[in-house]
Image (cartoon, rainbow, N blue to C red):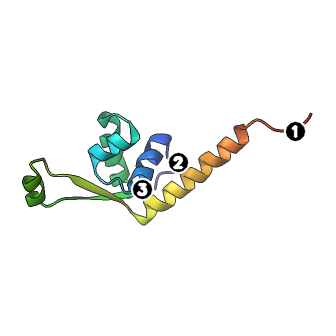
Amino acid sequence: MPRSLGVTSLRILGAIRDGVAYGLDIVAHTGMPSGTVYPTLGRLKRSGLVRAHWEDQRVAEREGRPRRRYYELTPDGSAALSEGVARFRSLAADLAPETGSR
């Protein structure tokens, strides 16, 4: 598992966790370009944080579109997402202005 995931990877993992399961849907959901999403999905897959499978060709043909590759989080992917979110929350708390008098 990678030591530390960046914002792009965390946003993609979060989208998959939230049920956004195929590439173009992730692009639309996150607003990130496909040239960012697809290479990141490949890295996440190679790292074991997501797994992928192709839908049945008959489904795509029936709907008149190309086959979709669906992604899901692995247990390591879920853990990495949780750790990454906690790390960014901690960073945000550290950077937040202090309230109160000096």
Q: Residue furthest bottom?
A: 75
Q: Residue at x 71, y 37 (%)?
A: 95
Between disc 3 and disc 2, the foreground one is 3
Q: Which residue is mark 2?
A: 4
Q: Which element is circle 3 on?
A: loop
Q: Which residue is mark 1?
A: 100
Snapshot quadrant of residue 74: bottom left
**Going by the image, does 64 lie left or right of 16?**
left
Q: Is residue 59 above or below residue 34?
A: below
Q: Residue at x 54, y 57 (%)?
A: 82
Between disc 1 and disc 2, the foreground one is 1
Label 3, label 1: how far apart the Cα atoms are: 37 Å
Q: Is residue 67 above or below residue 79?
A: above
**Image spot of residue 85 (x, y percent):** 56, 51
Q: Residue at x 76, y 35 (%)?
A: 97
**Image spot of residue 51 (x, y percent):** 31, 59
Q: Which element is circle 1 on?
A: loop
